[in-house]
Amino acid sequence: MSVLILATALTAVLSTYSSATMSSNLNLPSLGDSTSGIISQQEEHELGRSWLKALRNQTPMVSDPQLKDYLENLIFRLAAASQLQDHRLVPLVIDSPVLNAFAAPGGIVGVNTGLFLNAETEAQFAAVLAHELAHLSQRHYARNVEEARNKSIPNAAAILGSILIMATAGGDAGAAALTSTVAGMQSARLRFSRQFEREADNIGITTLARAGFDPQAMPEIFEQMNKASRYGSRPPEFLLTHPVTENRIADSRARADQMSDQQLKTTKGSQNYQFMRVRAAVLNSNNHHEMARQLNKELESGLTAASTASLAPTRYGLVLASMKTRNFTVAEQQMNLLLQQYPDNPYLIMTQSLVQAASGKASQGLKRIDQALSTNPQSYPLMATRAEILLQQQDYASARDELQKLSRLRPDDPDIWFELAEVQGLAEDIVGLHQSRAEYFFLNGNLDDAIRHLQYALKMSGDNFSLKSKLQQKLTDMQNYRQKMRNS
C-alpha cells in the first residue's frame, strides 16, 4: 500500500474519530480544524515526524554511514533543483531488496536497497527520487486530505483497524485487511491519483535535468520496471503504488525530449553510484563467500566490461565481500588497485582505512582518515569510520568522543545514538549510556523507554548540579511531549 494512500487514510481517520481515540493508539498529532481546507506545511511536518518515529520502530533500516551519506547528498542535490519550498528532508535507506521508494508528509524520502539493485545508472536512480520530491513539492498529500475527509465513518473504522493489525501483528493479515478495505475507495480516486502521477513525472523530469542528469532516465527506469512486471510473478512494489502504463511511458519520454532540446549539460551519473550500488548488493547478500567467488570469477574472466574503469565496481564489491569473509589479503590487494585509479575518492579511502585496521594496520588507517578529515572536518562517514577504527582498537574513550561530536552534528540520527550508547557502555560511562539510549528510543517512537532511561541517568548523576539540571530539563521536555501526543 502506498505511503501516500496510507497517510491519506490516516487523515481520514483523524477527521472522523475523536482525538482521544487516536492518541491512545497511533499517537499522531492533530491536523487542526477539519473544515479549514488544505493543511499547513507545519502540520504536515509534525505528522511526518510522528509517522517517522513509528516507521523506524517497525521497519529495518540501513545504518551504513557511506550509503546514507551518498543518498543524502544526492537527494539534497536534486532538492536544490526542484520546486520544494520546505527543505527539511529526511532521507532513509530501507533494508529491503524489494524495488520501492516513497515520499511521506514532512519531507521523508525513503528508498529500499532494492532500488540500488535495479536502477542501472545514477540518472535512473535519481529519476525515481526526483519523482518522489515532486510529490512533496506539489503537496500531493495535503491536496488529498480534503477528499479523504469525506470518507464515511465505517470506512475510516475499518482502515484504523487494519492499520493497528499491521502495527501490532505485522505480516500479511493487516496488509490484506487494509487492501480490501480501501479497494472500494480506490476506484473513486484513481483519476485523481493518475493526475498526481503525471504531474510528478513532468516536474520530476525537469528537476532531473536541472540537477545535471539525463532526463531520458525517467522513461528508461519506467520501462525497466514495466518489463520486470511482465516477466515476474509479482510486479515491483513501486509499480503497485505508482502504476506505469505505456501511455505514461510515452508521456514521460515526450517530456524528456523537450528537456533534452534545451541542451542542458547532463550525465548518466557518477562512478560513486556504481560503488554504492555494489555496496548495497553486499549488504543484502546472505552468502558473502559465494558472492566473493562470483565477483572474483567475473574479474578473472573480464566478462563485466571492456575497460578497466568499468571493472572498478566489481573490484570494490570483491573488497567488501572479502572483508565480510575476513579474507583481508584479497581485500587489500583489490583496494590498492582501486586507489591507483581513484586515489582521492573518499568512499574508497574510508574502505581502505577499514581494511587496514582489520588487517592489523590501524595506525595507517587512522592516518588516512585524519588526512581526509583535515579537508572535510565535519564529514559524517569519515567521522563514523574513524570511530569504528577506534572501537576496533578498543580505544573506547576516543571512539566515544568521536561519536559525541557526531551526535551534536546529527542529533536526529538514531543510528549514531545507538552506536554511542554501545561505546559509552564499553567506556564505563553509564550515565552517558542512559542519555544516549533515551535519545535513541525517543527517535524510534518509544517514549516510555526514553523517559525510563533519563530517569536512570538522573538517579546516577550524583552531586553534579549542571548535569542534573540538564537531565531534568530533558526529562520534563520528553514528558511534556508524551502528554502532548496523548492529548492531540
Image: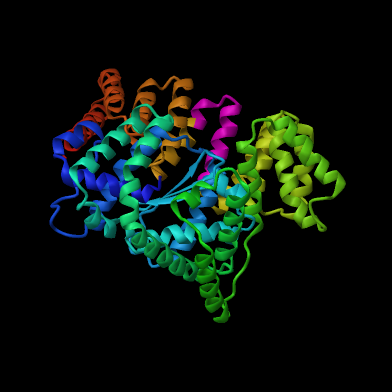
Front position in the image: 94 or 389:
94
Residue 306 in the image: state x and y as whole percent: 83, 58
Instruction: Let me know if residue 393 is in the magenta part.
Output: yes
Front position in the image: 115 or 165:
165
Q: Quadrant of the C terminus?
A: top left
Residue 77 in the image: state x and y as whole percent: 49, 61
Figure quadrant of residue 471: top left
Front position in the image: 204 or 467:
204
Residue positioned 36% across, 51% down in the render: 4
Residue 30 visible in the current orientation: no
Above or below, comparing residue 202 to residue 476 in the picture: below
Residue 396 in the image: state x and y as whole percent: 52, 26
Residue positioned 78% across, 42% down in the render: 334
Above or below, comparing residue 178 to residue 173 in the picture: below
Identify the residue at the far right of this view: 301
Q: Is residue 466 left or right of residue 60?
A: left
Front position in the image: 259 or 89:
259
Instruction: Let me know if residue 210 is in the magenta part.
Output: no
Residue 107 visible in the current orientation: yes
Above or below, comparing residue 229 to residue 22 in the picture: below
Residue 1 in the image: state x and y as whole percent: 40, 45
Query: What secondary structure prevails in the magenta region?
Result: helix
Residue positioned 15% across, 50% down in the render: 32
Q: Is residue 136 left or right of residue 22?
A: right
- Stretch of the chain drawn in magenta: 380-399
